[in-house]
Amino acid sequence: MQCDYFDAGACRSCAFMGESHADQLTRKDRAARALVAEVRPGAGVAWEAPFAPPEAGFRNKAKMVAGGTVEAPTLGILDGDGHGVDLRGCGLHEPAIVAALPVLASFVTTARLVPYDVPTRRGELKHVLVTCSPDGELMVRWVLRSTEALSRLRKHLPALAAALAEAGAPLRVASVNLQPEHKAVLEGPEEVVLTEDETLPMRLSGSAAGAVTLHLRPQAFFQTSTVVAQALYATAAAWVRDAAPASVVDLYCGVGGFALHLAAAAPGTRVHGVEISAEAVAAARRSAAEAGLPATFTAGDATAWAADGTPDLVVVNPPRRGLGADLCASIEDAAPPLVLYSSCHATTLARDLGDLPSYDPVRAQVLDMFPQTAHHETLVLLRRRES
């Protein structure tokens, strides 16, 4: 992939820019295999070829820092002096986002949203966050310091929706997030939804489960690449199909990606998800009800999970910090025959394998969630060793 911003030195976020995608995949695959082999030497892991999505136009979300002025706003990143660098044409974003960003920049001027100036600590608009669904619809969120601009946003929202539709990027959800503090935090806890729709439908297909629609609320987590998310869920369903688990617990379930795909692929399987975000749980419950799936969800801390009986399969999809020793001990005590681990940080995956001594990896695959960077997803199926 070639990038004018990288070549000009304006942005260095993509550390592997200019390297062939094949070489990037080889490097990530070797690194993941080496980490797993170090903690489980001699384990007969069936490694599948790494999953290679498109290396450009794959990001379904844009996290743009607002800079510049009302008359000449920038959407992108900040330089070393805290001033805005415009990256509206970033080639990593899905086409609908690329089409939308110039319209959203013009809207900053129309609605008089004063970009926040980090050096002087003045201004209102901190970030513009855009998420694109598989159908090309958008969720747009403005991160503001206060509610000062709310009335102007509401006033000009119909015109913005019309302009985005004309650009081929229809608006589904719009909201304001309030983050008044001067610190390096993307968003605050309070969200004000401005549209009738409060969720962005993520209609996923391509698995044995058929199409599954996940509902994404403004502050909910979703994988950065829709193509890789679909591959993760399809692979998970395929790997556990032969085991035919009657009961599944999905920890860190988010909006229900793994849980709902497993429930759809194996009717009759009891699936229960645990997620700390109440909003994500509400979205997962809505998706399950609309699809007629018997999956259930609880808002709670996955790290504090204690088994009620022994599930046939535990699915874990933790943040970069991994599971930790306490949750690994809980899984060891519950003794499910299978554990499916989706990891966004192979180093903590290897550490957790060390804390799951009763389990051996039997299948694994690297999925390239973030081409041009060192980040990737590693999916591993673990089987409990017989006594």
Image (spheres, helix red, strand yellow):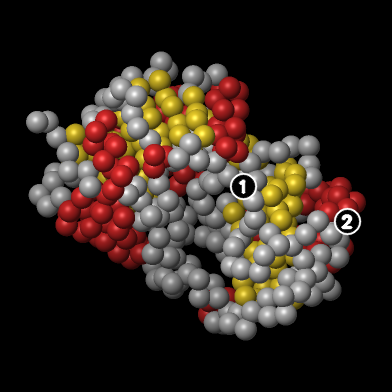
Let me know if residue 296 appears in the view. Answer: yes
Q: Residue at x 68, y 44 (%)?
A: 137
Give residue 258's position: percent from left, percent from top.
43, 35
Q: Residue 351: which quarter of the image?
A: bottom left
Q: Residue at x 64, y 51 (%)?
A: 189
Which label number is shown at residue 58?
none
Give residue 22's position: percent from left, percent from top.
35, 62
Give residue 76's position: percent from left, percent from top.
64, 69
Compared to residue 182, the image places residue 258 above or below, namely above
Which residue is identified by label 1? 219
CA distance separating discs 1 and 2 = 23 Å
Q: Quadrant of the C terminus?
A: top left
Q: Residue at x 60, y 79 (%)?
A: 79
Compared to residue 112, the image places residue 236 above or below, namely above
Q: Secondary structure at mark 1?
A: loop
Q: Earlier in the sequence, mark 1 or mark 2?
A: 2
Mark 2, other Cα within 10 Å: few <14 / some 14–19 / many ≥20: few
Q: Is residue 12 left or right of residue 129?
A: left
Q: Residue at x 72, y 75 (%)?
A: 121
Considering every residue shown, the one lying at the far top of the view is 268
Give residue 321's position: percent from left, percent from top.
38, 55
Which label number is shown at residue 152?
2
In this view, the residue in front, 88 or 111, is: 111
Compared to residue 220, the image places residue 299 above or below, namely above
Mark 1, other Cα within 10 Å: few <14 / some 14–19 / many ≥20: some
